[in-house]
Image: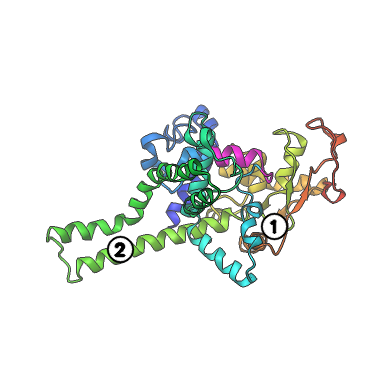
Amino acid sequence: STARCMRWTIIGHHVSHGGYDKLQRSHPEALPKQYKRGIFATGYRRFIDWLDWMLPGAWDVEHNKMHHYYLSENKDPDLVERNFELLHAMPLPSVIKYASMVFWMFTWKATYYSPNTFKELELSRPRSLAAQRWPKSRPRTDPLTLFDFARLPVECLARGEVADAFFWPALFVQWLLVVVPMMALVAFPAAFPMILGTVSWWPFALPWQTAATKALLGGVVADMMSNLHSFIIIACNHSGSDLYRYFTSCKAYSAEWFLRCAYSSANFETGSDFVDIAYGWLNYQIEHHMFPDMTPLQYRKLQPLVKSICKKHGVQYIQQNGLYRTWKMLRCAVGDDKMIQCDAILPPSSTKDRSPMPVDENCLGS
C-alpha cells in the first residue's frame, strides 16, 4: 500500500515533471537513464516503473499541463469544489454527504482519477474519438467518473441523442483497456494459491480456495489503503475556504501566476525525512507549483526562503496539518464551505497579462 503510493507521489510525480532531468545532464552516472521525463513509465516501461490506475501519459496531460497551468480555474480538472457541484445540489443531510466522501477516499484513483485523466488525454489528441465526437451536451471541463459511463448514456437516450449514447460505451471500453493491468496487479496475490490448487500442488492444510480469497481480499484492502493515503496528501492541496479560485486565466510565470501558486495552495508540515516521506514530498505545494521541475530535496531547501518572502511582502502562505486540510477540503466538497472566488489576485492595472476587468478588493494580495 505505502510502496504503491510512494511510487506515484515521490518517484512518478517528480520524474514526470522533469525534476531529475538537469541531474541526468550534469551527472549522468547518478541515476539510471529511465528516470527522465518522456522515458519513465512510457510504453512497456509502465509495467516496470509505475503501474497504477492512471495511465502515466494521461496523468501527464491532466496534472502537469492542465492542473499546473490552470490552477483553480474552471479549466483545472482537479478543482474539488467544482467537481462536487452535483453533491452540493443533492437534497441530502450533511451527514449523508460526508459519508459518501468516505467511498471516494478509498476508491478515488479507480473511480475518479483514472477515467478523468484518460478523458483529458483523449481530448488532447485531435484524432481521438473523444476529441472528434465529444457530446455537445457535456461540457469538456466536467469531471468524468466511473459511474458517468453508466449514467450519461441513459441521459443521452432520454434526450433522443442516440449517437451520443453510443459514444460513452465506446469511451468506456478504451478506458477499460488502460485499467485491466492494474486490476490484474490487485488480484495477483490470489494467483499463487489458485494455480497450485488447480494442479493439485497446494501443500498447506488451509484450502487453496480460502487462501486465494484471503489473498484477493488483502490485495483489495491494500489498494484501498493506498487510495486513502494518496487522497489525504493530494486531494486537499488546493481546496479550502481560505484558498482562491479564479474566473480568468493568466500567463505562466507572470507575477499573477506566482501569486496564484501561493493563494491557491496549502503546504503541510515540512523539514524532516519522516514528515516529507509520509506526505510523499507533496507537502511543498506552494514551492512545487512555482517551480514544478525541481527535485524533492530542492523543495525542502527552497521552502523557508519562499515563506520568508511571502511574509515580507504580505502574501498569503498557508502551512497546516494534512488531516486538518483534508477536513477543510471535505467541507468544500459537500458544500458547507466555499472557496474565495475572484478574477485575479493583482489589480488589472498592475499586469500586462490581461485586459482590465473588475477585481474584488478581498482578493488583493497585499
Q: Nearer the viewer, residue 26 or 107?
A: 107
Is tag 1's residue or tag 2's residue first in the polypeptide sequence? Answer: 2
In the rendered image, is residue 155 in sight? yes
- Element under label 1? loop
> Is there CB contact under 8 Å for labels 1 and 2?
no
Instruction: Decide whether residue 70 is among the magenta residues.
Output: yes
The CA span between labels 1 and 2 is 39 Å
Q: Position of residue 177 (x, y in %)?
A: 38, 43
Going 62% across and 56% down the picture, which residue do you hit?
A: 236
> What number is the disc on residue 2?
none
What percent of the width, then of the height, locates residue 352?
81, 30
The chief SS type of the magenta part is helix
Residue 60's place in the image compared with 27, above or below, is below
- The reply to whether residue 269 is visible in this rendering is no
Q: Is residue 219 above or below residue 99?
A: above
For badge 2, the amino acid type reads Ala
Quadrant in which residue 84 is drawn: bottom right
Q: Amino acid at mark 1?
A: Gly
Is residue 187 shown left or right of residue 140?
left
* Residue in the picture at 85% in, 40% down: 347
Residue 45, picture quadrant: top left
Residue 240 circle label: 1
Give 131 or 46, whichever is nearer the viewer: 131
Q: Position of residue 158 (x, y in %)?
A: 53, 51
Please determine whether, in this image, residue 129 is positioned above or below residue 322: above
Q: Write the start and end of the magenta stretch as one range.
A: 61-74
Residue 154: % across, % down = 50, 52
Return the residue nearer the eye: 292 or 20: 292
Count of numbered circles on the image: 2
Rendered image: mark on residue 215: 2
Name the secondary structure under disc 2.
Answer: helix
